[in-house]
Structures are given as C-alpha cells and as structure tokens.
Image (cartoon, grey):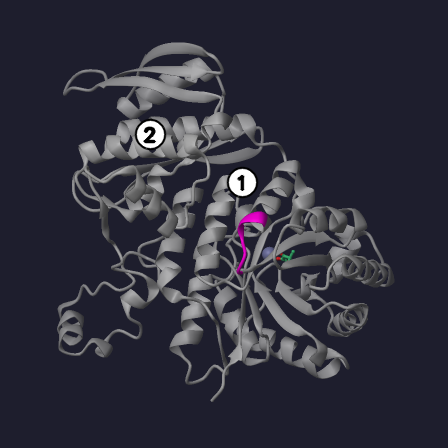
Amino acid sequence: MAQEHLIVFDTTLRDGEQSPGASMTREEKVRIARQLEKMRVDVIEAGFPAASNGDFEAVRAVAEAIRESTVAGLCRASEKDIARALEAIKPAQSGRIHTFIATSPIHMEKKLRMTPDEVIAAARNAVRFARNGIDNVEFSCEDAGRSELDFLCRIIEAVIKEGAGTINIPDTVGYNVPEQFAERIRLLRERIPNADKVVWSVHCHNDLGLAVANSLAAVMAGARQVECTINGLGERAGNAALEEVVMAVRTRQDIFPCDTRIDTTQIVAASKMVSGITGFPVQPNKAIVGANAFAHESGIHQDGVLKHRETYEIMRAEDVGWNANKLVLGKHSGRTAFKARLKELGMEVDSEQVLNAAFARFKELADKKHEIFDEDIHALMSEDVTTPEHEHYRLVSSRFHSETGETPQASVTLSVGNAEHHAEATGSGPVDAAFKAIESIVRSGADLLLYSVNAITTGTDAQGEVTVRLSKAGRIVNGQGADTDIVVASVRAYINAMNKLSSEPQRLSPQGDV
Ligand code: KIV
Ligand code: ZN
C-alpha cells in the first residue's frame, strides 16, 4: 500500500527552548538544526524572531545554514511580528511563517481581552499579511484543545480562505485524552467546507503524559503533520517526543496509513546532542533514547532475546542509532581527520580560530584518554570552544586539594574581560570550594538550582559532563562543562553558566500577552 507522508515539524528550538533553563545560543541552535536536517526532519521551527534580537539572529543563522528542511519562524497574529519573522527566514531555501492566536474562551477573554469576532479578524489579517510575504503559511489556534468546536470551524474556514496551507490544532495545556482529541480532528475535517485544501497538524503538550498518545490518535483521524521535540523537551511537562512518534508510526506500519521520512538511525545522536546542550538529562527508562530502552535485565528476557530477538524486542537498537558508538579518533589523529569527523557529526566549523581551539582541546583530551568517542567530541564542542569571543569569563587555571580528614580547598584564576583575578576558598568538597572561589571573583549572587554529573562514555577514564543550573532575578540558565577531571568539568560548567547569565538578554515569551 502506498503510504501517505506524515510531516515531522520539530519545535525543539522554539517550544523546546521555552523549558525553563533550556535556552540555547545561536551556535547551539545551528548545531541542533544541522542534526535535524541530517535526520530528514521536514520542518524546523527555529524560534520566535520577535522575542529578542538574539532570537531573530538565531532564526536567521538557522535559515542560512539549512538547505534540506523548511525553516519556520513563529509569530503572534500581528503584522509587526510577522514582518520580523519574514525578515529572519529570508535566507532559507524553503521558509514558513507560523502565526497563531488563542481561540479558547478563557484565553480570548482573560488573556487577549478580545471578542471572538476580533480574534477572527486578527487571524484573517495575519494570514493575509503573511501570504503577501511568503506562500507557506501555517496557522495555529492556541489552546484549540479547550476551544469551542463551532468557533474553531468559523476561524479555520476563514484563515483557509486567506491562504493558510497548514492548520495546526494545539493541545496547549495538555488537557485532552486520545479518543476525544482524535474526535476533535475528525469533526473539524468533516465540518469545515474547505478542510481538504490544507494539511492538518497537531501540537500536543504532555501535562497528563498523553502528548504522544494524543498525537498518534490525531494521525489516525487524518492529521498529516505532527509537531514535536527531541526528548519531548518543551514548556512545563514538554511536547510530544519526536523519537516516540516517529518510532511508533514506523514500528506499527500495520495500522498507520502514513509514514515519516525520518532517518531513524540519527535519533540517538540528536537526543544526546539536545541533552548535552540543554543540560536536561534523559531518564534511563525513557522510550527509544533512554540508556535502558534496549537493555534486558531479567534472565528470562535475556534468554528469550538470545534465542530469538523478537521475543522481547519490537525495534532494533541499531535502527535508532544505538551501538553507533564508534572509536573515532585517538592521540595520533591529525587536524584534517578531526575536522572531517566534526563535519560527519553535523558540527561544521567555519572559523579557523574555533577549529584551532577545538583541536587543541581534543589533543589535550587525547593525551589523557586514549579512545575518543563521538560523545566526547560533542562534549568538547561546548560553548567556550565554539564562541571564545563571546566569553566574558574564562578559566585560566585551577588547583584543588582534598585529603581525608582535611578541609577541601580550591584556588581558581579567571580572566574577566581583560584582567586576571585569583581567588581561594574552602568548602565541603572540592567542587563546593571551587564554586565559592569563582563566586568570590564574579559576585553574581546567583542561586544554584541544579548540579549534576554524568559519565559521557564508559570506563574510569571517561569524561564527566557537568550541568550547573543557576537562577538570578527570574532568569534561569544552564552551563555545561566536560573533562576527565570532574572538578575541572564543574568549574567549566559554572563559568559557562556565568557567561550565559552575563550575556543573554531578556526575551518575550510567544504565549504572553499580545
Ligand atoms: O502550545 C502551543 O499552543 C504553541 C503554539 C504557539 C503553537 O506552542
Ligand atoms: Zn506549544
């Protein structure tokens, strides 16, 4: 049976980034976008250009870098937002404007303070304005999951007449359950006279843990675009996880009338990249991308899998990119091999300065650790290597002392702007002492919300990847650092977070007041 195409719209860089602490730099967004493109994602929502200049630049950089996927910019239903988004996606080979307005009674009355007729007029105007700038326009009814069906029919019919090509039905607050959500999609497609002129899309949040189930039910009811994020990242409990939607549809081709074009062997790499960049770890038992997703602990299961794999496995680990852990480079690898491997991993480096810094870090690591894996390279391409010029704080040197029965001590030298500063401190452990020493130099007053260490690969010579989450004046940032010495990794992570706190401007949230 010829399968219909299920469009994968990835919003890791926009909705995913709305997770507190998950904000990404422009370079990080481009790196993720390249991996999404390699995975053959159809549409990459790169951000909300009207939110801030930083967001605008990031969307533009993604639009410049990506050639195979469509790049979308989100905008509220306002001409100003749309004009800004059109400008940001201009360099894209294929661009899309995604405009939205809230349609539920509670949002219209309490948030927008607009009447239903005013909302329809704003939506029509937004789509018309967007269509004057670009052919590919998507319209979303924010909080459609709690909107009145008759009103949805009215507004959707009107925006299709204005030229919207994709209609997205978000369950913004994750309130729906699968049967009811599917029925909603079915009814809208039946009742709206021009429904057959558009692609129907869904965008489900995970507040009740039903985002993937709701998305799949909607696909059964005729949706042909699913909006999702890597690892299910997103506002509050997150969005539908791309890897789960894609693998459910691929694995159950006996019941789904459509399939995606995703290269599933790229899924684990994408998951690790997003987790590394945002500092949001993946739980071990997470479907598809969790470390235990394909591990069999019980003897009965192991026995069954050894006799015949399909007794307990419905998917093959290698089909989603597990076991692709290649020994890539070593101590004797040269700059050319290193550059080529970066390219294969979707981390093309244009600047010589950045390449030199990354290669120097690689050589340093290869001296300590004989086998360098892809994961090590991902960690190595962290913020302080890729954007040294953006760094206000840089680690010059550090020294730690910890001994049984003695108080741990740390001394740290940082360059701050053009000056060097040195500080010493004691603490309950070397990491605590190091953070106190750094804090006595930078005096940020930030609160430490999270400190976590993860071994990047196996073995005691593995690099530890540290995530530090800091909060200051309502802003939350994550810093990452990796090193074979976890105290040094911790110091790098803290400094990385400090740099983000000192550089990232405040941004608007797309779902705030219009
Ligand atoms: O959850 C939501 O409603 C959204 C829209 C902007 C699509 O993210
Ligand atoms: Zn959303």
Give the number of the mark in front: 2 or 1: 1
**Count the marks: how many?**
2
* Identity of the residue drawn at 71% across and 58% down: 100
Residue 107 visible? The answer is yes
**Between 171 and 505, which is closer to the camera in this rendering?**
505
How crowded pointer 1 is (Cα within 10 Å; few <14, some 14-19, many 20+) is rated as some
Q: Is residue 121 left or right of residue 95?
A: right
The numbered mark at residue 490 is 2
Outermost residue toward the bottom? 1
The numbered mark at residue 26 is 1
Q: Which residue type carries mark 1?
A: Arg
Label 2 residue SS: helix
Q: Quadrant of residue 118?
A: bottom right
Magenta-drawn segment? 64-68
Percent of width and height locating residue 431? 30, 25
Percent of width and height locating residue 187? 68, 80
Q: Are marks 2 and 1 in contact (CB under 8 Å)?
A: no
174 in relation to 356, above or below: below
Q: Main secondary structure of the magenta part?
A: loop
* Identity of the residue drawn at 56% across and 33% down: 475
**Between 285 and 55, which is closer to the camera in this rendering?**
55
The tag earlier along the polypeptide, 2 or 1, is 1
Residue 21 visible? The answer is no
Percent of width and height locating residue 325? 25, 54
Q: Quadrant holding ligand 1?
A: bottom right
177 in relation to 456, above or below: below
